[in-house]
Amino acid sequence: MQSEEAAVEVTGLVKRYGGKTAVDGLNLVVRRGSLTAVLGPNGAGKTTTVETCEGYRRPDAGAVRVLGLDPVADARALRPRIGVMLQSGGVYSGARAVEMLRHTAKLHAHPLDVDALVERLGLESCGRTSYRRLSGGQQQRLSLAMAVVGRPELVFLDEPTAGLDPQARRATWDLVRDLRRDGVTVVLTTHLMDEAEELADEVAIVDHGKVIAHGSPEQLCRGGAENTLRFAGRPGLDLGGLLKALPDGAAVAELTPGNYRVEGGIDANLLATVASWCAQVGVMPDRIAVERRTLEDVFLDLTGRELRP
């Protein structure tokens, strides 16, 4: 039985294509009202997992429940409650962009205001243009609009900002944030680590058909590596006094002449300690910066840094 807090619950999912196992006993829970980013290298199994949740693929083993329903057996009941953004757009190539969006809106009981959505996503100029004549970015934005216009309880977004310019990307991010604030559960697949770090409440990293890491971006970036503070000053400072003032377990070193690194649990107290010590020794620190692992660092550490075919 599915947890009431779970919008998506995947248990022991297995999916094979001939002799190849694409998904190998994968487990995943997406909380209702959350935004969960599913990340993974090409061939990791993330796309197959999401397509199975959308009802486009039937599991070979395991169980999948979406809003408490089987996405294949209960497809008729589930489809009006979810939105799906496909990379291919899912639109007849000869259809006019906004006409198709209006048609999609009429299929739902309480759709979003189409004109407002068109304006928000910058689709006014291509309203009468056929889908095949739209630019790649316009197709992306139309696909996103069609996925959300029906006010779904849950929406699957596949690479929603791929090929978009910075303004369109920011507009898309704002729309996704608004969906999240309105209580819509969002499952996002993206290759853009900064997008996942910016938007996601939870991140699931998939590799070799399994979820190999799951947590908030902050939790994942904090695990396995301490934050680092760097500052610049005059070369050859005697660091003994600073080391004594720092908490146990901290370390300080001069990496190159005049460039210093402090490692440990970086917080406001440690930053104040470094600044106070600099004042005591008559140093005006320059370029103070607190660095931490990014989600991209975590992703590469877990999945490997080599390119995959």
Image (tube, rainbow, N blue to C red):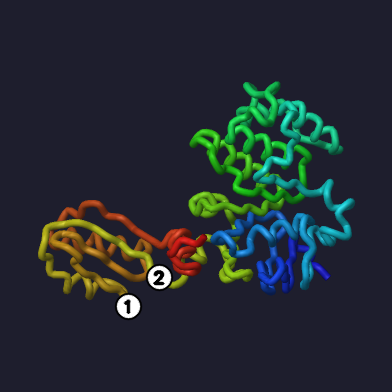
SS type, badge 2: loop
**Residue 148: x, y in percent?**
72, 41
254 on left or right of 306: left
**Residue 262: x, y in percent?**
27, 67
Give the class, few, some or many, for how many residues have Cα within 10 Å of label 2's Cα (few <14, many ≥20). some
- Number of numbered labels in the structure image: 2
**Residue 249: x, y in percent?**
32, 77
Foreground residue among 147 and 112: 147
The label on residue 225 is 2
Foreground residue among 200 and 61: 61
Look at 74% across and 51% down and name the residue there: 154
Locate residue 130: give its quadrant: top right
Query: Relative to 101, is 9 above or below?
Result: below
The label on residue 301 is none
Look at 23% across and 61% down and name the residue there: 276
Look at 84% across and 59% down and name the residue there: 72
Q: What is the C-alpha distance between the residues marked 1 and 2?
A: 13 Å
Specify the amino acid type for callout 1.
Gly
143 on left or right of 285: right
Look at 67% across and 44% down and name the residue there: 179
The mark lying in front, picked from 1 and 2, is 2
Specify the amino acid type for callout 2.
Ala
Specify the quadrant that holds the N terminus.
bottom right
50 on left or right of 272: right
Foreground residue among 58 and 243: 58
Which residue is labeled 1 in the image?
249
Q: Earlier in the sequence, mark 1 or mark 2?
A: 2
Locate residue 278: give its quadrant: bottom left
Query: Relative to 257, is 166 above or below?
Result: above
**Residue 168: x, y in percent?**
55, 35
